[in-house]
Image: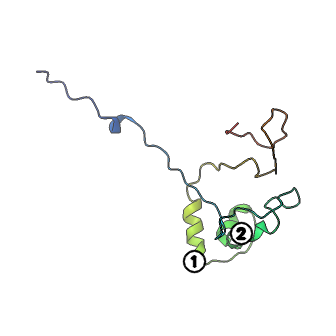
Amino acid sequence: MSSDPLPPSASDTVPPVSKVKCQISVSADGFLAGPNQSEEHPLGEGGEALHEWVVKLAAWREPHGREGGEVTASSGIFEAAAGNTGAVVMGRNMFGPVRGPWTRSSSSPTTSASR
């Protein structure tokens, strides 16, 4: 019998994994944006109405350099969702809209990890 201590367990040697959060505004009927997305209407026609609840909040406006805003029951929900955010992953339509297959010649203001 050996008197050596047992090797450490995996939970002792593996660093903790970061938490992943997902937050998105979706309508009661399952839409994320309005119809007919275009450069003039990046969230589709009427799509901005889906996000009005958060844009009105002081908790959203302050980190985006905007003054004023409301403090409502939604403020705490937004603050909890936005807290400790280290990175934001966005779809290719965030600054688009871009349609069709991915190409090397696509002009994009960001680098996408999904390519």
**Circle on res. 50:** 2
Separation of residues labelled 2 and 1 (CA atoms): 17 Å
Tell us which disc is closer to us: 2 or 1: 2
Q: Are marks 2 and 1 in contact (CB under 8 Å)?
A: no
Number of residues whose C-alpha sits closer than 10 Å to that of mark 2, classed few (under 14), some (14–19) or many (20 or more) = some
Amino acid residing under circle 2: Leu
Q: Quadrant of the N terminus?
A: top left
Horizontal side of residue 85 vs 15, given as left or right: right
Q: Is residue 26 above or below residue 56?
A: above
Residue 13 locus on image (x, y percent): 36, 34
| Residue nearest the viewer, comparing 115 with 83 | 115
Give residue 80's quadrant in the image: bottom right
Residue placed furthest toward the front? 29
Q: Quadrant of the C terminus?
A: top right
| Residue nearest the viewer, comparing 78 with 52 | 52
Residue 107 locus on image (x, y percent): 85, 40
Amino acid residing under circle 1: Ala
Give residue 50's quadrant in the image: bottom right
Label 2 element class: helix
Horizontal side of residue 16 vs 106, given as left or right: left
